[in-house]
Image: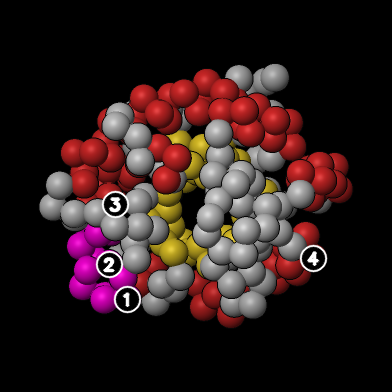
Amino acid sequence: MTDQDRPQIYLLTPAHFDAETFAETLAPVLDAAAIACLRLRFASDDDSEVARAADAVRALAHARDIPLVIDRHLALVERLGLDGVHLTDGSKSVRKCREALGTDPIVGTWCGTSRHDGMTAGEAGADYVSFGPVGDTALGAGDKVDPEVFSWWSEVIELPIVAEGALTPDLVRAFTPITDFFAFGDEIWRAEDPAAALKDLDAAIG
């Protein structure tokens, strides 16, 4: 497999973290493997809390030329100096977000298990779509994305896709030929050593 064919890593922050201390945890993770994109996944609707979280990670990401996108908060992209937004409602908001942000910022979206929703999001202007969960999880409806969605997409559609949710080294090896990105988040943050956990998943890509 060439570097060009190798899926890239799309890193998610924890949903909750201490903005005052998280940079010390994040820095070695960002240096543990090549990171293509970082998503600020911060579970708060308080603008000031989100801003503090963004401040904690933006400098680290940009110093390494890693684009930083934010979950949902379209209005904060420009205000906080971020590189784009990740939506969580499939194709519903893509067109509106693209019109609001223009052509340069990143607009991506979570499409769950729906290939149709992913195609609609691409037609509306998404830069990538995310499918999952790939592995077993107790969250949501319990549905897993069918690997056939990735196989078909990789053969037919040029828009990049992200494999996300409950990934294991075995799943990473299985999905490596049929995805463009792996989104790693809780898989590493629940580990005692997140940087080492990321290295293990990166090694599974091959």
Q: Residue at x 64, y 77 (%)?
A: 92
* Mark-to-mark CA distance, 4 and 2: 32 Å
Q: Is residue 168 above or below residue 117?
A: above
Magenta range? 44-55
Instruction: State the separation of the CA atoms marked 3 and 2.
Output: 12 Å
- For mark 3, what is the residue? 58
Asked if marks 1 and 3 touch (Cβ < 8 Å), the reply is no
**Mark 4 sits on what residue?**
116
**Gap between marks 1 and 2, in whole Å?**
7 Å
- Which callout, 3 or 2, points at the residue further toward the start of the chain? 2
Which residue is painted at 42% across and 30% down in the image? 198
Query: Closer to the N terminus: mark 4 or mark 2?
Result: 2
Pointers 3 and 2 in contact (C-beta within 8 Å): no
Q: Earlier in the sequence, mark 1 or mark 2?
A: 1
Type of the residue with mark 3: Arg
Where's residue 128, x and y in %?
A: 63, 55
Tell whether 102 sits left or right of 17: right
Q: CA distance from mark 1 to mark 3?
A: 19 Å
Viewer-nearest of discs 1 and 3: 1
The residue at the point 62 percent across, 28 percent down is 170
**Secondary structure at numbered mark 4:** helix
Residue denoted by label 2: 50
Overall secondary structure of the magenta section = helix
Q: Quadrant of the C terminus?
A: top right
Q: How many angstroms separate mark 4 from mark 1 (CA)?
A: 30 Å
Q: Label 2 near label 1: C-beta < 8 Å?
A: yes
In the image, residue 112 above or below residue 5: below
